[in-house]
Image (cartoon, grey):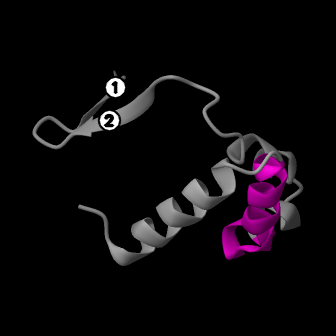
Amino acid sequence: QLNDQAEIAADACRAAAGDLAAGKLLATAIGNSRGGRNLIDIGQERDIDIAAQIDKFDIVPELDLTTWTIRAAR
């Protein structure tokens, strides 16, 4: 179950996913966030475009809470 912030982020992502320019819109939103501004301040603004790419990989990391290990989930 998602908390409020995660639900808002998921809704925003779903809304942007149907837009052809979703990656650019998402990159703009990330760049305007506190974390995005921090990246820009330290010269890592290229990371924003990378983070805004949707469905780049078909796997995601999954944390096993029992062993505290991270594995690839599909």
Residue density around tag 1, few if under 14, some if 14–19, many if 20 or more, within 10 Å: few
- What's the CA distance linking mark 1 and mark 2? 6 Å
Identified by mark 2, the residue type is: Glu
Specify the label residue 62 is tagged with.
Answer: 2
Identified by mark 1, the residue type is: Ala
Question: Under tag 2, what secondary structure?
Answer: strand
Specify the label residue 73 is tagged with.
Answer: 1
Q: Quadrant of residue 16?
A: bottom right
Image side of residue 47 versus residue 18, left or right? right
**Is 32 a magenta residue?**
yes
**Residue shown at 10% from the left, 39% from the top:** 66
Taking the view exactly as shown, the residue that stands out farthest to the front is: 18
Specify the label residue 53 is tagged with.
Answer: none
Query: Is 32 located above or below residue 63 in the figure?
Result: below
> Residues in magenta?
21-37
Tag 1–tag 2 contact (CB < 8 Å): yes
Residue 56 location in percent, x, y? 64, 28
Q: Majority secondary structure of the magenta segment? A: helix
Residue 47 location in percent, x, y? 78, 46
Residue 36 location in percent, x, y? 75, 65
Dividing the image into 4 quarters, which one contains the C terminus?
Answer: top left
Taking the view exactly as shown, the residue that stands out farthest to the left is: 66
* Mark toward the start of the polypeptide (1 vs 2): 2
Image side of residue 53 versus residue 64, left or right? right
